[in-house]
Amino acid sequence: MIIQPITGPQLASDGNIAAAARGGKQGELMVSELHGRFYEQAYRGNVFYGGGTAVQAITNATFTIATTGATATPILGLWNPLSNNVNCVILQACLVTILTALQETGPGPYVWASSLGNNAITTGATPTNAKTLQASGSNAKVFGNGAALTGMTGTLAAIRGSSLPTIMSNLSTLQTAAGLQMASPGGVENFDGCFQVPPGGVIALLGSGTPVAVSCAGTLTWEEVPV
């Protein structure tokens, strides 16, 4: 089939069939967005989100790559049960990191860690459906309020660094009210489908340092696609 677009804009009325798609001056097919890029899947009820609904202190080593077993507590995380029939395709993660005392130690760059083959985790929260705004419709569990990965049989392994902003220094500092170290502003990490959690998979956002007097809040958003 040969596609022959018409160069330049057209003025069509509702109910009429356009003669051809719009083309550009270099022969390319022109496409415009009708809605936001996640609208279609959100409208169909396939997009979910969840995470830290309150500011969570991450001063314990279980929030870092120092702890990789079932006592690990993800800053943000997701578990897709082994019996589930969907892949959880990560779309976005957002995070805000703040200081809670004058003497602090930064958490270092954040990293994403994963574990596979898990079907016995007993913790985590039910995610919210982006269409209904109700906590229903998903078998996955989301982490972000200090819940440990209780029942995880695998071990977390760091798989990729995160671009989410962190404290600018990883050193221990003693500040004054007149010379505060500023925490980095909140940020968004876009994955756009290149980061998928299969059935049995766990992902966890962890610190790479030993944070002191640091707290976070954030959200993980994903689409559930049948396997």
Image: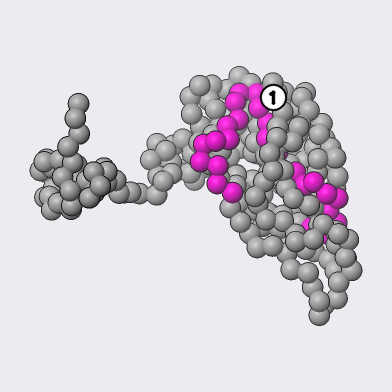
At which x and y percent is residue 199? Answer: 61, 23
- Name the residue located 78 percent from the left edge and 69 percent from the top edge: 181
Magenta run includes residue 206: yes
At which x and y percent is residue 212? Answer: 85, 56
Magenta run includes residue 180: no
Tally of marks: 1
- Name the residue located 77 percent from the left edge and 24 percent from the top edge: 154
Q: Nearer the viewer, residue 215 or 54?
A: 215
At which x and y percent is residue 65? Answer: 81, 40
The answer to whether any part of residue 209 appears in the image is yes
Q: Nearer the viewer, residue 40 or 29?
A: 29
Q: Give the range drawn in magenta.
A: 189-214
Taking the view exactly as shown, the residue that stands out farthest to the front is: 26
Vertical order, 227 against 70 (above or below): above
Question: Quadrant location of residue 127?
Answer: top right
Q: Mark 1 points at which residue?
A: 116
Vertical order, 179 against 75 (above or below): below
Q: Left or right of 85: which side holds 40?
A: left
The answer to whether any part of residue 205 appears in the image is no
Q: Left or right of 125: which side holds 108?
A: right
Question: Quadrant location of residue 62?
Answer: top right
Mark 1: few, some, or many residues within 10 Å (few <14, many ≥20)? many
- Name the residue located 74 percent from the left edge and 50 percent from the top edge: 109
Q: Left or right of 70: which side holds 145?
A: left
At which x and y percent is residue 101? Answer: 84, 66
Disc 1 secondary structure class = loop
Taking the view exactly as shown, the residue that stands out farthest to the bottom is: 178
Q: Nearer the viewer, residue 207 or 119?
A: 207
Q: Left or right of 77: which side holds 84?
A: left
Q: Nearer the viewer, residue 113 or 140?
A: 113
Q: Indicate the amino acid at tag 1.
A: Leu
